[in-house]
Amino acid sequence: MVQPTMMTTQQIDWEGLIPESEWTEYRAVVDKMREKGIRFALGGGLAFSEYANRVRNTKDLDLYIYPWDRDEAREVLLSTGFVDYFDEKPYDRTWIFRGYKDSVIVDLIWTSPNHRFEVDPRWLSRGRDVVIRGTRLKLIPPEELVWAKIYVLQHDRCDWTDILNILGNLGPMLDWRHLLDRVGPDIPLLAGILSVFRWMAPEKASSLPQWLWEHVGLGPQVLDCSGDTSGGRAALLDSRDWFGPKETFQA
């Protein structure tokens, strides 16, 4: 059995990140889900904040659930005053249910938009525990968060920047064999992100397992920091800072 990833504790100011008015709505859903015995783990901006050490509030709560719980979980949202966001903005309901209430959104997610994976017990058990406003909650694991984000490379949205920040903060501590097993035939896609990471942050990349580079087909890692003084290469992509800690509150 693959053991949960061990990581150092991040110091996230959850109360500063999530206003009380938002948390009141989230808490009602969380309490009702637990009352009904529906298992879940948090993903999205909250998981990213913890694993990348760069706080971000997107005014929504991503709850990863088992596929067989989606109908009951949807009823939980409706019973706590949320309405289907589809009526305001249509979306693909084959992989997600979006509940909307007073400018707050709760997403129920059981698979990916491309249906490349479904949530299984490892999604809901291997992640870190966090305490938000006195409530202990489980996050999805960082490996699964990376797995989900590698496919978000669209014309109008790209989550690879999130992955690069997670690698910058937790790269050496990730369970790479578990992640490679999860990614499976899409390892070349993961290799693409690793290649960018090695170019933009060679010193950070040097802390990743040496066997990993060969495994993904990138060959032995060569630490070449020329031209990367003070993060010079990363600045070629974005002049703003890349790796945490950094407070980035955004709506």
Image (tube, rainbow, N blue to C red):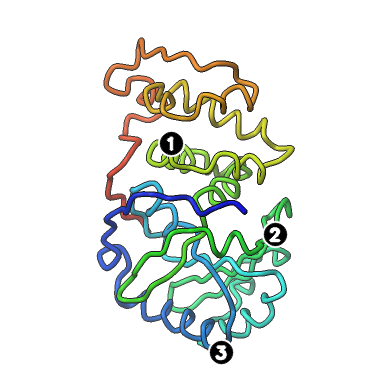
Q: Do the residues labelled 2 and 3 touch (CB within 8 Å)?
A: no
| SS state under label 2 | loop
Q: Which mark is residue 172?
A: 1
Q: Tell me the kind of residue under disc 2.
A: Glu
Q: Is mark 1 on a helix, strand or loop?
A: helix
User: Residue visible at 54% across and 45% down?
Assistant: 146
Task: Using the image, tell me which numbered label, if any, was put on residue 118.
Answer: 2
Element type where label 3 sits in the image: helix
Residue 172 x %, y %: 43, 36
- Which residue appears at 31% of the width and 50% of the height? 248
**Residue type, numbered disc 3:** Ser
Q: Residue 79 carries which label?
A: 3
Q: Residue at x 70, y 54 (%)?
A: 117
**Label 1 or label 3, whichever comes before in sequence order:** 3
Give the residue displayed 55% in from the left and 39% down from the top.
176
Observer-side mark, 2 or 3, equals: 2
- Of badges 1 and 3, nearer the viewer stands 1
Contact, CB < 8 Å: mark 2 with mark 1? no
Q: Quadrant of residue 68?
A: bottom right
Q: Position of residue 111 (x, y in %)?
A: 68, 60
In three-dimensional space, the C-alpha distance between marks 1 and 3, rounded to whole angstroms, equals: 43 Å
The kind of residue on which mark 1 rests is Pro
- Observer-side mark, 2 or 1, equals 1
Q: Is residue 91 visible?
A: no
Q: Residue furthest front?
A: 1
Nearer to me, 120 or 88: 120
Horizontal placement of 8 versus 45: left or right? Answer: left
